[in-house]
Amino acid sequence: MSESHNGAVVVARDVTRRYGEGETAVDALRGVSVNIAAGEATAVMGPSGSGKSTLMHILAGLDKPTSGDVELAGTAITQLGDNALTKLRRDHIGFVFQFFNLLPMLDAKENILLPLTIAGEKPADGWFEQLVADVGLTDRLSHRPAELSGGQQQRVAIARALVSKPTVLFADEPTGNLDSSTSHEILELLRRSVDEYRQTIVMVTHDARAAAMAHRVLFLADGEIVRELGESSAHDILSVMEEVSAA
């Protein structure tokens, strides 16, 4: 895993994002600077419209800032062309989404291996078997998504995101479509990937319990980072979230 800037694998400097022009323009981000530390989980919270999803998309190279710079794994990505960006995302980024985004015609094994299949690669010896065991899917590999519970589908999505050993895993509301018991299991799984694999995670969430699994919580409001907490309880995170939302 590549690192830069004193252990940061993602670095954003003075990032702005404006949508539209003139009087109808919307400033989704207003000069955000952040370092994402290697081997840690960072949660991003904020009220609706605060810019948290925009920030994640820009850090992941899915959107370009209006101004400012972003580095990922030591590469300045802001000016990269589409082909170079696609390759960088394939080599360095894993994604987990709220609605799983599995291909219904593929079984669990095929869905997990999809990033490597597209790249024409195979997992390192023993890695696939270890990963599948760690996420609890060894006896579900031949099942298609429709034959799996929501929690099992999200486990497949997490394994798919981790199978290529990405520099950063971006998770967008990864528990937003799950019940509380299943959410807890998924959050434990994500935290274990940090503790055991030294996986770097950036997670956008509205759930204080989800943010409590992170080493650091960033709070956005009106396109700016307005507060930051270290590892904290869900109660403390919720208190800050209420302050930020009321400001």
Image (spheres, rainbow, N blue to C red):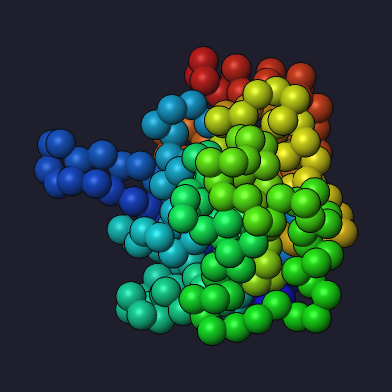
- Residue at position x 48%, y 66% from top? 70
Residue at the bottom extreme of this rendering: 120
Would residue 133 appear left or right of 207 to someone viewing this image?
A: right
Q: Which residue is at the front of the view, 189 or 206?
A: 189
Quadrant of residue 218 in the image? top right
Q: Which residue is at the front of the view, 178 or 217?
A: 178
* Residue 246 against residue 4 in the figure, above or below: above
x%, y% of residue 172? 54, 44
- Residue at position x 48%, y 32% from top? 221
* Residue 228 against residue 135 in the figure, above or below: above
Q: Is residue 225 in view?
A: no
Question: How many discs appear?
Answer: 0
- Residue at position x 33%, y 75% from top? 82
Would residue 1 appear left or right of 96 to someone viewing this image?
A: right
* Residue 45 against residue 123 in the figure, above or below: above
x%, y% of residue 40? 76, 55
x%, y% of residue 170? 58, 54
The quadrant of the rendering that contains the N terminus is: bottom right
x%, y% of residue 196? 87, 59
Would residue 239 appear left or right of 188 to someone viewing this image?
A: left
Quadrant of residue 185 in the image? top right
- Residue at position x 78%, y 62% from top? 131
Quadrant of residue 223 in the image? top left
Q: Is residue 189 in view?
A: yes
